Image: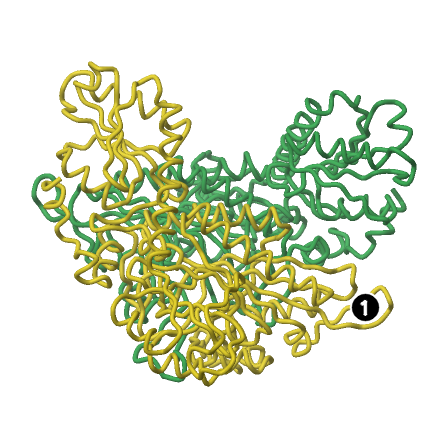
Chain colours: A green, B yellow
Amino acid sequence: MSKDKKLVEAITSMDEDFARWYTDIVKKADLVEYASVKGCMIVRPYGYAIWELIQNELDRRFKETGHENVYMPMFIPESLLQKEKDHVEGFAPEVAWVTHGGSEKLAERLCVRPTSETLFCDHYKDIVQSYRDLPKLYNQWCSVVRWEKTTRPFLRSVEFLWQEGHTVHATADEAQEETIRMLNVYASFCEEILAIPVIKGQKTEKEKFAGAKATYTIESLMHDGKALQTGTSHNFGDGFAKAFGIQYLDKDNKLKYAHQTSWGMSTRLIGAIIMVHGDDSGLVLPPKVAPVQVIIVPVQQNVEGVLEKAYELKERLSKICRVKIDDSDKMPGWKFAEYEMRGVPLRLEIGPKDIQKDQVVLVKRENREKLFVPMDELETKVPEVLDEIQASLYNKALNLRNSRTFKATTIEEMENILDDTQGFIKAMWCGDAECEKEVKDRTAATARCIPFEQEKISDKCVCCGKEAKEIVYWGRAY
Amino acid sequence: MSKDKKLVEAITSMDEDFARWYTDIVKKADLVEYASVKGCMIVRPYGYAIWELIQNELDRRFKETGHENVYMPMFIPESLLQKEKDHVEGFAPEVAWVTHGGSEKLAERLCVRPTSETLFCDHYKDIVQSYRDLPKLYNQWCSVVRWEKTTRPFLRSVEFLWQEGHTVHATADEAQEETIRMLNVYASFCEEILAIPVIKGQKTEKEKFAGAKATYTIESLMHDGKALQTGTSHNFGDGFAKAFGIQYLDKDNKLKYAHQTSWGMSTRLIGAIIMVHGDDSGLVLPPKVAPVQVIIVPVQQNVEGVLEKAYELKERLSKICRVKIDDSDKMPGWKFAEYEMRGVPLRLEIGPKDIQKDQVVLVKRENREKLFVPMDELETKVPEVLDEIQASLYNKALNLRNSRTFKATTIEEMENILDDTQGFIKAMWCGDAECEKEVKDRTAATARCIPFEQEKISDKCVCCGKEAKEIVYWGRAY
């Protein structure tokens, strides 16, 4: 193990400098490379393979819940972006503007979509006429652009990959149902597939999406105690419908405004995986989103029979999981460190001694636990161990979150907790935006959400001391 | 049948006005809607579902041949676009320029990628150092932008979806091998999945890709006798490597320039499907890319037992194909016309009489052939019929192409053929660009390709009468 340590010494340790540890992993696990445009990233094959697994699973869940994929243009005419007042205020300051096509100046400048509400509305206005046309449950996989100044791969970048669901419904109730349904899809996806526990709740007025009536969110806690918003789901009510004129003729022969939702998740999820599960040896991938679930490393591969056996095992395992073999002439120690860096959940070692004993050695990435498995039990044991790892990562993340979720009844307490250690702080709130602002100004923590699971830890607002309305999760956030 | 005709009368007939027939299908089969930005399109759920089937199958074939997916930024700094001289000349006139981010003017303007050679090269320069790093076999699924003035959905639009493969190799031979390998992947995909026969060949110097050493193409013939380039594969030699400084240390310890390829296919393929297989009742989809392969239409669905039976059949068929049921209260005649318009390969009718006879009626979209199939043979018969349809569509397309492939030994002959009917014209060429230009000026036909399968129909160039070098496929093209 000291040898492995030496091989990966290039990673900064998490405790020393979390931000550098993060970018070290991103680079050294070959997830991302910086691009020639500042703030943009190149998603490399290994990073993209994780994204593909995320996409496949999310897409399956979207289709199961009745959604269809579409593709909207990437350009939004300035006049279209301006149709909904709050929306344009929220996004206009951070969009990229196309002003020329070829050698000609455009009559109207176009922004590169920062999000596509306006495009979907413009389309819905054309295709929704009758109650029979509703609901429309659309989703789009694409990239969006937000002209951010301070960027970090996966967490905040000028361009990023995401999906954006946009739906239109006859009634307010149906829109609300859809908003919560998709929040739940996101939550179960994070917990079951990414092994990341989430807090479900509603955003405050101040934190909600530009143009939304209500924004719901799932919030997760990273290893450094900072919060990350992993997905959001918005109910627009009929605000956009009124701005864009999306009306339908109802059964009662009356013309009514439609109700809308939107919801999105992005490559930010990969950042969450890194910061929730990673350790000082590198990335730790939950088996369900690991492009390689088992890496076979032959030991003493020059000894006759070892490589043959290794190929045979690969052949067998390829039927039940994503498996790869590293038969290069590098030293096993180098390979161990390399695939630990890349977060491969399970390493399978096979050498002459193992062959003699008719066994293989399995080593779990998460804790380096070794298992000696009889050769003929491989097909039952490997999926079992992968499931164990998936569950274990979830539990560890949940324990971490629990151990770093605090309660506070005064701002001073909040300050002390945040100075001492980071984490979620549960504290009561009166509902006044002034108090929310003061908490933020004094602690640098924002209201992450008003959780669905309410509890009462005091009668008074953590800030003003007046009567409290609800409990809020606060935290410093990415 | 006269009733169906009446229901779909809104489509222009192919013979009357092919261009309008095309746009009628595109709109009425719900493939595309126009967007608020001129020349951009909204790909609607049905159109996007076809694209997803194309993507899945192509992606599988790319991965089978060792390729990995990545994602590059959508922006290219102007200075980067300019690094390869021929390339920038080819693309600069038709790119969209981003000049502002938020409220600030950019120091250097960025173009929205029209294609990503320059970005891949910039990346390869960073990640390729040694022969051990080669080859890199990358592909990207994304959208690109070309500021075209005359646009048509799927065929030519300001933004379109595509894949672009970009590979880098140690030697010229390997790059050439890859170029041809991917052309063959494209060709077999078109023939096996889209049921579209293709001519494989090389582009002339004049028609090759900006910056390429050699461009290879697959060309198909549309129903109106015009040619469509369905896919291209380029060998760049070491031209880009020299412009971008992509060098590697070879086994012999010498620094050498790498060799590169790129290849792309786009949503244009959906245009090809429409124009190769469609007819006056609408779209005709090859079963392998049909989002719905079988549509179940209950007949007299109010009679007891009919809907139950229909659901039961749907349940059974959903295990072996993509099946949908239309149990709406619309008339069967309307449904027949609707799913013919949408090109669903097979209609299954089930009514009280069929139930009595323990049979279903299958109707092929391509020719309205009716088959009476015993209920218990459904699972064997349906896949069989779908395969038959797939093969039949290919054969019809091949017959059409053969019947519209002509030979000519003079330009006058070419002119007569093109005035009379459109099609491919095979004619000998001396290899001189002047002759190529004259043919184009006089006939509006371009050199589609120098086919791999050469033959000799004359000793003399069709234009200048001097000694001919090779046979060329000529045609007017989309």
* Quadrant of the image containing the C terminus of chain A: bottom right
Q: Callout 1, which amino acid? A: Leu
Residue B129, located in which quarter of the rendered image? bottom right
- Disc 1: which residue: B249
Instruction: Identify the secondary structure beneath mark 1.
Output: strand
Q: Is residue A125 visible?
A: no
Q: Nearer the viewer, residue A307 or B449?
A: B449
Q: Nearer the viewer, residue B136 or A230?
A: B136
A56 sits left or right of B223 in the view? right
- Residue at x-position 31% and y-position 73%: B150
Q: Position of residue A349 (x, y in %)?
A: 82, 34
Vertical order, B317 against B271 (above or below): above
Q: Nearer the viewer, residue B194 or A106?
A: B194
Q: Position of residue B93 (x, y in %)?
A: 43, 81
Vertical order, B378 against B392 (above or below): above
Vertical order, B108 against A267 (above or below): below
- Extreme left residue here? A253
| Chain at tag 1 | B
Residue B305, located in which quarter of the rendered image? top left
Q: Position of residue B311 (x, y in %)?
A: 28, 23
Vertical order, B95 against B343 (above or below): below
* Quadrant of the image containing the N terminus of chain A: top right
Total labels drawn: 1
Q: Nearer the viewer, residue B377 or B415?
A: B415
Q: Residues within 10 Å of mark 1 (few under 14, many from 20)?
A: some
A164 sits left or right of A171 in the view? right
Q: Is residue B74 visible?
A: yes
Q: Position of residue A238 (x, y in %)?
A: 24, 51
B215 sits left or right of A351 in the view? left
